[in-house]
Amino acid sequence: MTQLSSLRLTTKLNNHQETTVPNAFDKPTAIYLLTNDLKVNKTLTKLELRWNQISDRGVEALAEALKVNNTLTQLDLADNQISDRGVEALAEALKVNKTLIQLHLANNQISDRGVEALAEALKVNDTLTKLDLANNQIFDRGGEALAEALKVNKTLTKLDLSINQISDRGVEALAEALKVNDTLTKLDLSINQISDRGVEALAEALKVNNTLIQLHLGWNQISARGGEALAEALKVNKTLTQLDLEHNHISDRGGEALAEALKVNNTLTQLDLEHNQISDRGVEALAEALKVNDTLTKLDLRWNQISAGGGEALTEALKVNKTLSLNLILQTTKYPLEEVKH
């Protein structure tokens, strides 16, 4: 007899978009039946419950099951109606659960209070490797709490804090944690409230951190000053492979600084500078760097202010560089938008 290892309680429309299961958990008995089974089930490893209507009561029941279940490794509760009360229950479960590896809580109603509870759990939990908290209501206090947890946690490798309200204060705390943390490989801070001050703190952390591989800072308030700080870090950092700076204000000065870094950096493989007000001057500097850099495989320069002159400089660089995949929107007077890919 086939044993169940994965259960997905979502539905798909004809266009393959996920939607809620109508009234799937509007009655207490529904979620309680599921959680009672979890307490005794010995085969289920993955449970997807996103796009339902699970509230704190349902999550509290799930948390009780997690305290005794010893097979579940992935739990997806994204896109529900979970607030701090439910997350506090999950946090208590994480203090004793020894099998859960991935926990997805994106698109809920979790504030700093809930994150503080999760942070306390992370100080003692030694199995969770991925925590997704994207698109909640997390501010600096939550960021600071997670930073304290990262100083002692030895298992978490991926942390998604995108689409929250974390500003420089919270990022400075996270940066201090990165100076001592040696397990986190991916940190997503896209779409927060981060300016140059926070990025300068992250840059200092990157000079000593030896584990972070991916850093996502897109859609923030980073200017040339922040770009220059990151460039200095890239000259000495030996582990970062992906840096996402899309939709900021890096401009030519930041582009030139990053170009100088690319001449000596030999680990970065992906750099996203889409929509950053970079013109031909910055692109020409980047093009010169590409003539000597042999590790970058992807450079995104779409939606900048690049004309034919910048395009020609990149064309010359690509004659020498054999590793790069380039995404570029070339803006000229004759051809308003021409997409160039190499």
Image: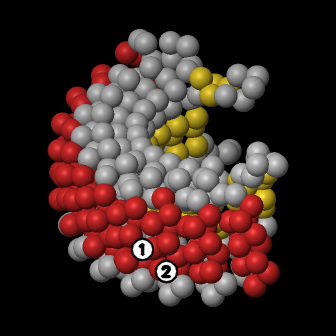
Residue 341 screen position, x and y as percent: 78, 61
Q: Residue at x 40, y 36 (%)?
A: 135
Residue 202 appears left or right of 327: left
The answer to whether residue 299 of the structure is visible from this angle is yes
Name the quarter where the C terminus is drawn. bottom right
Question: Which residue in the protein does label 2 denote?
Answer: 260
| Kind of residue indicated by mark 2 | Glu
Other-residue count near label 2 (Cα within 10 Å), few / some / many at <14 / 14–19 / ≥20: some
Q: Secondary structure at mark 1?
A: helix
The residue closer to the viewer here, 148 or 196, is: 196
Q: Residue at x 75, y 69 (%)?
A: 312
Other-residue count near label 1 (Cα within 10 Å), few / some / many at <14 / 14–19 / ≥20: many
Residue 87 appears left or right of 18: left
Residue 7 in which image quadrant: top right
Q: Residue at x 55, y 13 (%)?
A: 22
Residue 244 screen position, x and y as percent: 50, 59
Find the distance from the CA under tag 2 to the CA under tag 1.
8 Å
The answer to whether residue 63 of the structure is visible from this angle is no
